[in-house]
Amino acid sequence: MIENKHCADLTQLERPNMDALRGAIGYALRRAQLSAFEDLIHALEEVDLRPAYFSVLYVISENPGLNQSEISTALGIQRTNFVTMVDNLEKQGLIVRQPAKRDRRSHALHLTPKGIAVFNRARDLHTEHEARLIEKLGPNGREQLLPLLWRIADE
Amino acid sequence: MIENKHCADLTQLERPNMDALRGAIGYALRRAQLSAFEDLIHALEEVDLRPAYFSVLYVISENPGLNQSEISTALGIQRTNFVTMVDNLEKQGLIVRQPAKRDRRSHALHLTPKGIAVFNRARDLHTEHEARLIEKLGPNGREQLLPLLWRIADE
DNA sequence: TATTGTTATACTCTATAACTATA
DNA sequence: TATAGTTATAGAGTATAACAATA
């Protein structure tokens, strides 16, 4: 008798056997990514940024003056969808499109002073998020995990 | 002089410095998950299944007769969105909603004979996909990676 | 001719509120 | 009163095709 009659109704749901799926790398990657993003999305609400927008500010911050194609390609975002993201970040007053000198087709992206301030706060929030993940992973977990993930992601 | 004058035009794009982002666990998880799914999505095209639909067939296959809430909860899919997925799988003739015996509100899900055949083929395609990931990860890569991912995903 | 940025568009995924029938 | 399933709907995110300006 596994069920306790006194509290059996607390959970009517049968727990499916998930053993095989939990052994699938892609499924585990998906669930881990969703769990990590759930935490990050919540953490970045304070600065009104979604994870993808934070990553765009990150790349611009470390590479000011690059054009949209260079940034979107590096992030794995299609140019066409990147336009909307740049529009939104510009509306928020966080970045500006400046006329590029060498190629008049392209726009050099830069953070505004407000963009720098918001990004600095976002980076702190992200660092706290990262610390929570590292605590979950345990000793050396991050150092083991990162190279494995990039072996899958690179190329 | 890094650029070679004879082939400099092959890549006009400057490569952004991505070092900091590549050290972020969440970003690495995202890129790895997208890369893995790109392969799986392509692999499952033959059987006209998306990864999430394959995971549903997987759970039903190993747990026939469970209701929609039990399966969707285990997969982290909201009940409300799960309805459309069950509709689509039923339209494809892969599963059936059967009247549950104990609770007339719920539907017991089962694979049809066609569903079993399609799932068996999908599982083979998935096994080949998994082998490609394992090859990328190298020796013991999978055994190191899986527990780390579930440490992040569980709870 | 090729590339940068853009618009338009469509499809998938995800999230919330409210309803119905049963429990 | 709570739960299983459903509907409706809105917002992200993602994909393709086509265009103007510039290279």
Image (cartoon, coloured by chain):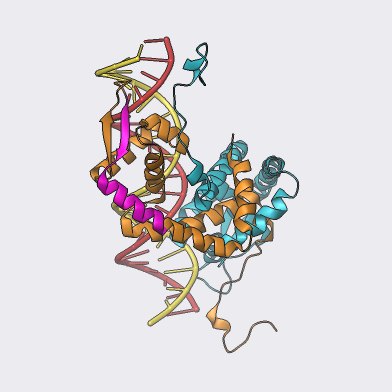
Chain colours: A orange, B cyan, C red, D yellow
Q: Residue at x 47, y 31 (%)?
A: B15
Outermost residue on the right side: it is B139
Establish if A4 lies above or below A115: below
From the viewer's side, name the closer residue of B44 and A72: A72
Quadrant in which residue B122 is drawn: top right
The reply to whether the magenta stretch includes residue A116 is yes
**Residue B48, position in %: x, y?**
57, 40
Magenta residues: mostly which secondary structure?
Answer: helix
Position of C22 compared to B74: left or right?
A: left
Figure check: B82 above or below A66: below
Task: Say which of B6 and B84 sits in front.
Answer: B6
User: In front here: B100 or A30?
Assistant: A30
Residue A132 % position (x, y): 50, 63
Q: Residue sitting at 29 percent across and 23 percent down? A: A101
Q: Residue at x 26, y 31 (%)?
A: A98
- B9 above or below A78? above
Total count of labels: 0
* In the displayed structure image, the side of residue A1 where residue A74 appears, left or right: left
Picture quarter with the C terminus of chain B: bottom right
Q: Position of residue B144 (x, y in %)?
A: 69, 54
What is the quadrant of residue B99 in the picture? bottom right
The stretch of residues the image draws in magenta is A106-125
Q: Nearer the viewer, residue B20 or A152?
A: B20
